[in-house]
Amino acid sequence: MLKSAKLFGVAGLFFLLSLQACRPYHVRQQKYIQLVQQEQFALAEDQLEASKKGKKKEKHKLLYVLNRGYAAFHQGKWQESSQWFMKADRLVEDYRKQLGYDALSLLVNANVKPYKAEDFEVVMMHYFHTLAFLKQRNFESALVECRRMNISLSEMYFKTSTKPKYKDDAFGHLLMGLTYEGAGDINNAFIAYRNAYEIFNTDYASFFETHVPTQLKEDLVRTASILGFRNEVDFYRKEFKLDSAQLNRTKPFAEAVIFWQNGLGPVKEQWSIDFVITQQAGFIQFNNAGLGLNFAFPVSGMNNQDVTNLSNLRVFKVAFPKYISRPKVFTQAQASVNGVTRSFEVAQPLEAIAFKSLSDRFAREMGTAILRLALKKATEYAIRQENKDAGAIMGIANAITEQADTRYWATLPSSISYLRIPLQEGKNKVILRANRLNNAIARTDTITIEAQKGRIYYEVYNTIKP
């Protein structure tokens, strides 16, 4: 009797731990996220500093460092944000070399290892770092970060056996072109714009329903014209069907490039998928007819006890992360200065990229998760036959350890749009307006730029709250 009481006491403790483990990561970061949603970035930074979890737990350290860089960036603390993003970059490199954590995650789950970041999150780390350098007019360092935006994707692509759709970043090449222009290197700016155009016209149009921005078309023709590339000018003019007014604008005194970071990206939650187990033709089959999923593992690769245990199972669940969209407050935005008004165009559809990235790695990771959980559940079943109490405890332990990894960079924008607008000499007050779904102006902001001749100024317009 006493032994059973102790067993159920342990089971109760496991149950309480399971409730804690089931909470998605964004719920545990709720205070910080709420402050970001209110655009209270200084208070958000204080919340991060006061939190002990991110600083002390190695497995959450990357997210802590990325959030510190993000909070510093949105307060205009460019040098400090650069330091945080450099630290995050080092962590990304270190974690991707640590194979021991990957082996442990196969036995337990992905939450036991340090968070390595989604591919697009690494790209966005370099984006913020690039802008931090551009705000300091450090073009050399900004170009290094632009190159790394695309190099990081290429490296991850070639290391993955199941090739993802998100393999090159059009926005990264676009940003590189804008940076080269700011540094006065028109030849490399043209090459970067051309690369961006090709990716927008293929991958971004097909996978993310994002088409070539008109501004990019104009910049591609303009830089080709400056360089005297007549064949390219003629080709792109016909390709884009640009009118003469768009192609013959006089060179402005100075320009502003403004990036509109709209809303917050999707939330990462956990969902459970049911599988039916069958054995036939020397394979253990795991099927979900509703989702059209089928995974087969050869019996020859398992020991006899595992095969026997698996044969006793019929149905079980697997936990996997999924993204859920957040409501969008704003759908359009414009900038006006000195009687000129321009509209923002989407250049980085982050929400669509997030959904596609998770979908791409679903099949790759699901096979591993299924076999791991099936063997754990089969062992649990065998123990239950010997001792119901011990089997119950193991069942709770399995529930605790079998949790989807719901960690993610929760404060990335839903999308990034951009525009270029001419400036006059001296002080320029740029009026920014964000519109709701019904096209009603819901928010107005002002950026003041003291313009010097021939310069490009890089600004960020962030809209999260109404």
Image (cartoon, rainbow, N blue to C red):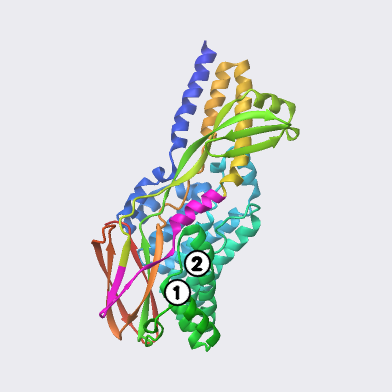
Q: Is residue 332 above or below residue 253?
A: above
State the count of labels. Answer: 2
Residue 356 drawn in magenta: yes
Identify residue for label 1.
Answer: 216
Q: Amino acid at mark 2?
A: Phe
- Asked whether residue 303 appears in the rendered view, the answer is yes
* Position in image of residue 264 (x %, y %): 38, 55
- CB under 8 Å between discs 2 and 1: yes
Q: Residue 423, percent across and down?
A: 32, 82
**x and y percent of residue 239 in the render?**
49, 76
In which image quadrant can residue 311 be found?
top right
Q: Which residue is mark 2?
A: 200
Does residue 87 appear in the picture of this structure? no
Q: Residues within 10 Å of mark 1 (few under 14, many from 20)?
A: many
Tell me which amino acid carries mark 1: Leu
Q: Is residue 320 left or right of residue 80?
A: right
Choose between 106 and 438: the one closer to the eye.
438
Query: Could you tell whether 65 is left or right of 295 in the image?
Result: left
Looking at the image, is mark 2 or mark 1 earlier in the sequence? 2
Q: Residue pushed farthest right? A: 300
Q: Is residue 411 above or below residue 316?
A: below
**From which residue to which does the magenta span run?**
334-360
In the image, residue 296 sits, relative to residue 147, either above or below, namely above
As rendered, which of 327 and 302 lies closer to the eye?
327
Q: Which residue occupies the foreground of this view, 295 or 387?
A: 295
Quadrant in which the C terminus appears: bottom left
SS under mark 2: helix
Instruction: Provide residue 354's location: percent of width, then percent of height.
Output: 48, 53
Q: Residues within 10 Å of mark 2 (few under 14, many from 20)?
A: many
Outermost top residue = 1
